[in-house]
């Protein structure tokens, strides 16, 4: 066998290997597309599972997210963050700060030594 000869060229095996490569390529592209679709639909499935009040908004943001990807990030945030619970937590933190007595700095008495 020479350094310049190519194996499987001009043979039936050549056509078969091209067919296998085509099947692998189409399968890889299809798997990547399916995976992208499943990840992209994640906010909608989460919203339906949790019976979210903003299902329409999340669905619209998810579909717009196919064009502008940053909008999809907003859909994920709206779907996965319970805004009512988060706002109540912020309110409670705010009220805890109001209930605490204000801390005033008192100057330390300096002792004069003679």
Image (tube, rainbow, N blue to C red):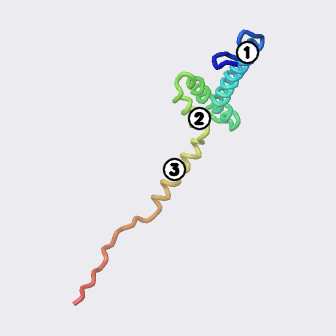
Q: 33 or 63, which is in the foreground? A: 33
Question: Which x, y percent locates residue 90?
Answer: 51, 50
Task: Using the image, determine if residue 44 lies above or below residue 13.
Answer: below
Task: Classify residue 16 as left or right of residue 94.
Answer: right
Q: CA distance from mark 2 to mark 1?
A: 50 Å
Question: Which x, y percent locates residue 75?
Answer: 57, 32
> What residue would you read off at disc 1?
8
Task: Classify residue 24 as left or right of residue 76.
Answer: right
Q: Which mark is residue 90?
A: 3
**CA neighbours of label 3 inside 10 A, class few (<14), some (14 to 19), many (20+):** few
Q: Are marks 3 and 1 in contact (CB under 8 Å)?
A: no
Residue 58, located in which quarter of the rendered image? top right
> What residue would you read off at disc 2?
76
**CA neighbours of label 2 inside 10 A, class few (<14), some (14 to 19), many (20+):** many
Q: Secondary structure at mark 2?
A: helix
Of badges 3 and 1, nearer the viewer stands 1
Q: CA distance from mark 3 to mark 1?
A: 69 Å
Residue under the point 54% across and 21% down = 67
Question: Which x, y percent locates residue 8?
Answer: 73, 15
């Amino acid at each position: 066998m020479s350094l310049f000869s190519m194996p499987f060229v001009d043979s039936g095996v050549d056509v078969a290997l091209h067919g296998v490569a085509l099947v692998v390529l189409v399968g890889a592209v299809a798997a990547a597309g399916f995976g992208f679709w499943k990840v992209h639909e994640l906010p909608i499935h989460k919203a339906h599972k949790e019976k979210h009040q903003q299902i329409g908004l999340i669905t619209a943001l998810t579909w717009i997210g196919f064009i502008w990807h940053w909008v999809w990030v907003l859909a994920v945030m709206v779907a996965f963050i319970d805004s009512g619970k988060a706002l109540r937590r912020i309110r409670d933190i705010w009220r805890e700060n109001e209930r605490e007595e204000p801390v005033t700095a008192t100057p330390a008495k300096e002792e004069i030594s003679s």
